[in-house]
Image: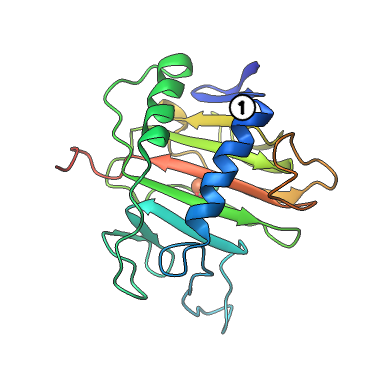
Amino acid sequence: MKVYSPRRDFVIVEDYFSDTQAAEWLALIEALGSDALRGFHHPFVRPNRFHKAPKYPVKKFMCLGLYWNPEDYRYLDRLPYNQERPFPIPEEMKNLAQEILSQFFPWHDFVPQSVLVNFYTKDSSMGLHVDKDEEDKVSPVIGLNFGSTCRFFYEDEKGVMLDIRIPGNSIYIFGGSARLMRHGLGSIYTNTLSPGSEEFLQNKERVNLTIRQVFSKARA
Ligand SMILES: O=C(O)CCC(=O)C(=O)O
Ligand SMILES: [Fe+2]
């Protein structure tokens, strides 16, 4: 494992997952993602003044727990396109989040309420943005990364945009003074699949999960 902080309150842990662990997480994501009603889909996004037929920036997407609606940026209990309830966040993923925080980030009462799963391919990227659709804007965001390495842009303490490479089998956490930093995704590098993902992902594919607390007070 290699632990480092590109800026204050932004922690990256490379080689966090072994190849067997990565394969187990990817098998779980594939199983959930292949469900026709609640699994991966390409979300609708609203036309805007620049794009008559905009596309969501990743190939496919799903949520566990609360659904983040890419159309209006709100969190929902049910999928807006078929009124199903999303899959709940698996217990082992909730436990993983607690374990990650206890090891690498000083935060105690984190309640995972939504997991956004983004599936990137060679044409995917994600523009600079701030994760600010959560009512709770202080609980950290935990990212799990599998597959290809990507270029990750982030804002430092002075507001300067910098970039780093985020490989598969790594995690990142941003909270505290980094919780509202701007960030975005650039290119995905070729021939960088991390060990354990070969069975599930092709060259230039990447899966990212972000585990979030959405509401300020845990909901029953
Ligand atoms: O893919 C990533 O690492 C980040 C995704 C992201 O920024 C988001 O879903 O808000
Ligand atoms: Fe984000």
Instruction: Name the quarter where the N terminus is drawn.
Output: top right
Q: Is residue 176 left or right of residue 113?
A: right
For the question of whether residue 91 can be seen, the reply is yes
> Which image quadrant is residue 155 in?
top right
At horizontal 71% and vertical 50% (from top left) the residue drawn is 201
Q: Nearer the viewer, residue 103 or 165?
A: 103
Residue shown at the point (47%, 54%) measured from the top left: 32
Classify 99 as above or below 141: above
The part of the image, by quadrant, that contains residue 83 is bottom left
Q: Amino acid at mark 1?
A: Phe
Q: Position of residue 198 (x, y in %)?
A: 75, 44
Q: Which image quarter holds the C terminus?
A: top left
Up the image or down, 119 lies above or below 145; here it is below
The residue to which callout 1 is attached is 17
Up/down of 132 relative to 76, above or below: above
Q: Is residue 65 above or below residue 106?
A: below
Near mark 1 (Cα within 10 A), the count class, few <14, some 14-19 or many ≥20, is many
Q: Residue pushed farthest left?
A: 220
Q: Secondary structure at mark 1?
A: loop
Relative to 218, is 89 on the left or the right?
Answer: right
Picture coordinates of residue 217 (x, y %)? 18, 38
Percent of width and height locating residue 208? 57, 45
Of all residues, the one furthest to the right in this rendering is 191
- Residue farthest to the bottom, as pictured: 52
Q: Nearer the viewer, residue 148 or 26?
A: 26
Look at the image and name its color scheme.
rainbow
Instruction: Give x and y (percent) for residue 119.
Output: 60, 55
Q: Is residue 188 left or right of residue 33?
A: right
Is there any visible trace of residue 129 in the rendered image?
no
